Image: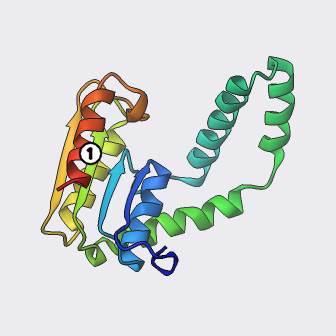
């Protein structure tokens, strides 16, 4: 990033992408970070279920038939993902345990219509980062995929405002 000539780098991440954003803020020099709908913990079985659900929906968008999707998902469901997901769960926990290493300005956004875990996660993250420039905001009409929700227009305004501070 910086080696490529960029002087200021800001990062935004949604859900698990937000975990990667938090980790990046811990180990790299970035300008600002925004996280949306970030989980501070996920059980491996629940992660697997969410990945399968995401894959199913993605394949629907691709235009695959229900039969094709069910065959592909069945194969995916048989894969031994659990070990990998346990390692990923440990990555999430390690990242959350090191929130105090984050000192860059950070905005934490979550949807009120999402699972209660995300409200709790947002508050834990907010209370444990060491940034003087931190902001937390809920969006009453949003679920997990906030960028596609009813609060989308306000969310985009808030993102642009935070990045342009």
Vertical side of 94 occupied by 144: above or below: above
- The image shows residue 103 at horizontal and vertical percentages of 23, 74
Instruction: Please report the residue visible at 54 percent of the width from the left and 62 percent of the height from the top.
Output: 89
Badge count = 1
Here the colouring is rainbow
> From the viewer's perspective, is 28 left or right of 85?
left
Instruction: Please report the residue visible at 34 percent of the width from the left and 69 percent of the height from the top.
Output: 8
- The image shows residue 122 at horizontal and vertical percentages of 27, 51
To which quarter of the image does residue 24 belong? bottom left
Vertical side of 112 occupied by 75: above or below: below
Vertical side of 71 occupied by 9: above or below: below
Quarter of the figure with the C terminus: bottom left
> From the viewer's perspective, is 56 left or right of 47?
right
Q: Residue furthest top?
A: 66
What is the crowding at mark 1: few (fewer than 14 residues within 10 Å), some, or many (at least 20)? few
Comparing 101 with 164, the one in front is 164
Vertical side of 136 occupied by 128: above or below: below
- The image shows residue 63 at horizontal and vertical percentages of 76, 21
To which quarter of the image does residue 28 belong? bottom left
- The image shows residue 124 at horizontal and vertical percentages of 25, 58
To which quarter of the image does residue 97 belong? bottom left
Q: Secondary structure at mark 1?
A: helix
Q: Residue furthest front?
A: 5
Instruction: Please report the residue visible at 38 percent of the width from the left and 66 percent of the height from the top.
Output: 9
> From the viewer's perspective, is 62 left or right of 124?
right
Q: Residue furthest left?
A: 132
Residue of label 1? 160
Comparing 22 with 50, the one in front is 22
Instruction: Please report the residue visible at 20 percent of the width from the left and 46 percent of the height from the top.
Output: 161
């Amino acid at each position: 990033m910086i080696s490529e000539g960029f002087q200021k780098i800001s990062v935004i991440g949604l859900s698990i992408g937000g975990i990667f954003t938090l980790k990046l803020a811990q180990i790299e020099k970035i300008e600002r970070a925004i996280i949306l709908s970030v989980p501070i913990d996920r059980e491996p079985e629940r992660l697997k279920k969410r990945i399968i659900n995401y894959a199913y929906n993605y394949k629907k968008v691709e235009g695959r038939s229900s039969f094709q999707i069910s065959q592909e998902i069945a194969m995916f469901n048989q894969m031994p993902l659990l070990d990998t997901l346990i390692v990923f769960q440990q990555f999430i926990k390690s990242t959350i345990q090191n929130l105090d290493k984050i000192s860059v300005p950070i905005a934490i956004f979550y949807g009120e219509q999402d699972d209660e875990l995300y409200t709790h996660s947002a508050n834990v993250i907010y209370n444990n980062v060491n940034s003087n420039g931190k902001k937390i905001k809920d969006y009453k009409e949003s679920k997990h995929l906030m960028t596609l929700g009813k609060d989308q227009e306000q969310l985009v305004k808030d993102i642009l405002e935070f990045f342009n501070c």
